[in-house]
Image (cartoon, rainbow, N blue to C red):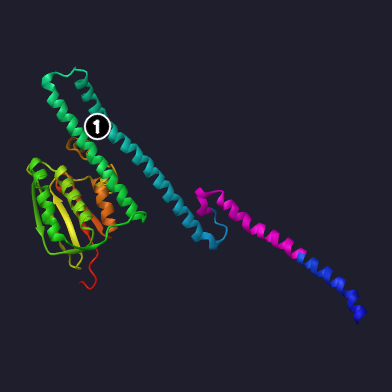
Amino acid sequence: MWRLYNRVLPLLAAGGALVVALAAALGALLTRSLVRPITRMADHLDTIEANVPYEELIPLARTIQSDRRLRENNETMRREFTANVSHELKTPLTSISGYAELIETGMAKTEDVPEFGRRIHREALRMIRLVSDILQLSELDGQHAGSAAAPEHAPVDLASLVREVAGNMTVNARKAYVTLQYQAAAATVQGSRDQLTELAANLCDNAIRYNRPGGHVLLRCGTDGDGAPFLSVEDNGIGIPQDAQSRVFERFYRVDKSRSKATGGTGLGLAIVKHIAALHGARIDLRSTVGTGTTIRVTFPAARGGK
């Protein structure tokens, strides 16, 4: 038995080594054949969903495609934002530089200096508003992405906020010959009072800016039938065309560019409104008819235990 064992052992060892070698070779071939389609799929990311070799990889392909589109959209938005900021800053800077040069070189007549100074002041204020809005958007972006600390949320009395905003915006409304009124019903929201004040002020400013002399703006707050708090701004201004209503919350998008430039608009007010609403989990509804007016309503989540 011992001699038989000694004779068979090398054969068993050789057979085992052969089996291991064959298994390794077959495993390598099988792995290569399985991985090759995945590699080809990775080489065609633009059409990755159409080249999925295995059904189990469909969710992964969809996730990759979605992430790729998101990155491309973000890059496009970044380029457009940079181009828009450069353009918006260049216009007032060119105006300021031109008027200042006329005054510096003595080419401006004495009677023209006050007017040139007024225009320089106006363009400087426009730049200050633009930079302020850009900084606020950057801060809101950081809070939305979680890279910046968001302010603590606390109960905010919308009725008190509406009265305060209406009082602050009255001067602007009078300058535009627009009547600003408010209806403040009891409503409470968990959020940042400063941000919600900015949201209401931007909505009012937009309604006043795109109105007509003799027009009116109504700022309202309350709760709907489901107990959800809301804040709305209604006006009888120029209205928004149907094809532009889906874009008015984009940065630097203007329905009427000439009017916005004439009234000092930065094109960022509604973008700020959109970000603040998102940070508060609110929904924005817009209804508008050209020549009749616009209503923008921000509905916040209903309080727990509410109706």
Q: Is residue 8 left or right of residue 275?
A: right
Residue at x-position 91% and y-position 74%: 7
Q: Which amino acid does the dot numbered 1 rest on?
A: Pro
Whether 22 is among the magenta residues is yes
Tell me the residue at 32%/54% (across/down): 143
Is residue 255 rendered to the left or right of residue 213? right
Can residue 303 be seen at all in this image of the molecule? yes
The quadrant holding residue 187 is: bottom left
In the image, is residue 110 part of the stretch drawn in magenta? no
Q: Which residues are magenta?
A: 21-50
Q: Main secondary structure of the magenta part?
A: helix
Q: Nearer the viewer, residue 109 or 199?
A: 109
Q: How many marks?
A: 1
* Figure quadrant of residue 150: bottom left
The residue at the far right in this view is: 3
Q: At 38% from the left edge and 40% from the top edge, which residue is drawn?
A: 79
Camera-side residue: 46 or 159?
159
In the rendered image, the residue lying farthest to the bottom is 1
Is 161 rendered above or below residue 3?
above
Judge by depth and name the residue closer to the eye, 68 or 107.
107
User: What x and y, as percent, mark residue 208?
Assistant: 14, 45
**Spot occupied by residue 19 in the image (x, y as percentages of width and height):** 78, 67
- Mark 1, residue position: 92
Give coordinates of residue 156: x percent, y percent.
19, 62
Query: Where is residue 214 drawn, in percent x and y?
Result: 6, 43
